[in-house]
Amino acid sequence: MKKENSTQLYGVKEIARRADVSLATVDRVIHKRPGVSAKTRDKINKIIKELDYQPNLLARQLASGKTWRIATLIPKVSTETAYWEAPLNGIQQAETEIRQFGIKIEKYFFDQNDKASFVKQSELILKSGVDGILLAPSFIEESIRFTGICQQQKIPYVFINSDIPDRDSLCYIGPHLYRSGYLAGHLVSYLVTAQSKVLVLNISREIEYNHHIRRKEEGFRTYFKDNGRNNEIITVEIRNADHSAVKKSLAPLLEKHPDIGVIFVTNSKVAVVANYLETIGKGNVLLIGYDFIEDNITCLKNGSVDFLICQKPQEQGYRGVMTLYQHLAMGATPEKVYHMPIDILTRENYAFYKN
Amino acid sequence: MKKENSTQLYGVKEIARRADVSLATVDRVIHKRPGVSAKTRDKINKIIKELDYQPNLLARQLASGKTWRIATLIPKVSTETAYWEAPLNGIQQAETEIRQFGIKIEKYFFDQNDKASFVKQSELILKSGVDGILLAPSFIEESIRFTGICQQQKIPYVFINSDIPDRDSLCYIGPHLYRSGYLAGHLVSYLVTAQSKVLVLNISREIEYNHHIRRKEEGFRTYFKDNGRNNEIITVEIRNADHSAVKKSLAPLLEKHPDIGVIFVTNSKVAVVANYLETIGKGNVLLIGYDFIEDNITCLKNGSVDFLICQKPQEQGYRGVMTLYQHLAMGATPEKVYHMPIDILTRENYAFYKN
DNA sequence: AAAAATTACGTGCACGTGCCCGAAAATATA
DNA sequence: TATATTTTCGGGCACGTGCACGTAATTTTT
């Protein structure tokens, strides 16, 4: 009942012995360096395949002393964008884990409400001459221009959090936005009766650029259509995430539609809505929103928010760095798209969630 | 806007230079070997602290050539226990990742319906003299005896999947059973009307030993009590997971209680219940169960199961091995308990789930 | 056929650490 | 004081790989 996998690990030495050549020749073949006759090259390659040779990465790093530089470009963390703390943590976690392997991470931050800052930081990155880039392409056109230059300079880059599908990125790591909206539709469908109305709230300054939000709402509405649910769905856009702006928009709306049973907030700004509803004694309206951030968890705890949808932002940062590392150091080619799981958080399970 | 963490990495060489001693002396201090005067020891220790010296694990492993042997003891994978395929995969994933660091994993399997096989395999492990053990303590008394000997022999062990709280394990990695039942209660409470009844199904051969199931049901019932839900909750135990046994138990029950609206299956055997309900035209009864296994996913897809609760079994195996590795190789002491997240799977998000 | 140029391969050091062995210094014993 | 013993420390090799350099073998040129 015990299984042995006695796969012996062979090194360059054994290859050299079998091929009856020196270590240096094997080394040349492994690194595709010139100076080896076709005959011996083939012989050595055959043995490498036979032995399923895996280079000892420890020794390699130790000997080469090579260090890889990776730049990260994400929104700066602020009260308004608390979300980005998580990816940053993930990046830092990856950094400590692979520092010993010769990876240096250089972090750049931009202001999500300021395209110019994105452009400026991206230029700094290009000037610094790093080996790989992890970025959140919040501004599409600017990102396309930036990554175009990266491609020219053969610098691999990875998108996190949102994708620009047709680009030649190493990969995309982040949510499937449409699907997460679709899931929200499913959850909401359990919560509402056939008569009551559903409110979709898009709270964002730069809404015209926010493909994030669009895709989620699209998925949400499609769920209702696909499943023959005819509830009226009202969409409202609010440009500011503070209490007064929310009040100004919602007060007349809730007056006009007292039969709104569920509100779906399409991003992390759900807490402010929850708080407003509490103040006007409408705590019974069901609420569903996004992201594991402190304010939202508080609302989840006290019951003013029913569900949060989360997509492991920390792991996005972690995995993004790791993917670049594996590509740079080992030549690994990842899947073009890695969608994060769509996690459902409630009062009962948030405490165990790993962001 | 760019942050530099210019923490230079110093090595033994730099320490030796500053202390004006040889590398060997520094080495002795680091490994707490004798042969160093108290004075120089203190001097070197001070410098180590100042420089925040982190040994280069690559070089260490390379130089020492030490290999650690870890034994894993989990139920064997069968059609009946498809669940255990996932932890095994996690173990294997960890193995490939850290093989280069000198870790050898030796896998042992027992029959979950046969205590004797557990005892036999555990004895084999002890005889083999490994450095660490990862085990699923399915049989409590036998596990206590086994881990008692481990403690005597100073072999660290990690529990996965279920815990024996008072033991001196390195840590426990697995679900918070009670809490997952509580969460199930919450989900079900969204799904049932005040009048309809709820059925809890425990499907397991060795039910008397199955603390798993007990804890989940306890959490489930407590949710209803805590939240003033007075739905009648019926518990039924079925000793066999095949179709006929389920039919034999459920047919009279559903006859007697036509107003059962939701069925909560307390483990992975939910698919067979779903299939039975379909055959008798009771597909409208809502179903919630456990675990990301093929049969269950099929039911999720076709709508016969509404929710699955999952607890990352693969990661349990992966993390268990990694924890032991970090303890053995780096002397790390993990948190005593690591609870897995309690994930909710539906038709919409299962495709993105990482088990 | 000799010299020059090119190709093919081997030698040896380095990376940071572990660890054996032997030497020097300090202390104890005669 | 001379010798034996213990304590304290340094030298040097090894791990598997990368890489600079040197040399032998082969081909090309004269």
Image (spheres, coloured by chain):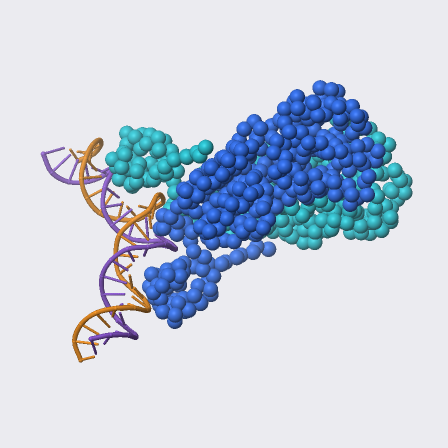
Chain colours: A cyan, B blue, C purple, D orange
Is B237 on the left-hand or right-hand side of B103?
Answer: right
Which one is in front, A190 or C27? C27
- Asked if residue A29 can be seen in this view, the reply is yes
Image spot of residue A72 (x, y percent): 56, 48
Looking at the rendering, in which quadrant would you find the C terminus of chain B?
Answer: top right
- Asked if residue A71 can be seen in this view, the reply is no
Residue pictured at 50% horizontal, 35% vertical: B116
Looking at the rendering, in which quadrant would you find the N terminus of chain B?
Answer: bottom right
Residue pictured at 63% horizontal, 35% vertical: B207
Image spot of residue B234 (x, y percent): 76, 33
Res. A212 image quadrant:
top right
Residue pictured at 52% horizontal, 57% vertical: B5
Is A296 on the left-hand or right-hand side of B87?
Answer: right
Image spot of residue A234 (x, y percent): 82, 36
Res. A135 image quadrant:
top right
Q: Establish if B76 lies above or below B49.
A: above
Res. B32 image quadrant:
bottom left
Which one is in front, B31 or B164? B164
Image spot of residue B63 (x, y percent): 35, 51
Q: How many marks?
A: 0
Residue pictured at 82% horizontal, 52% vertical: A244
Is B57 on the left-hand or right-hand side of C1?
Answer: right
Q: Establish if A231 lies above or below A156.
A: above
Q: Establish if A91 lies above or below B207.
A: below
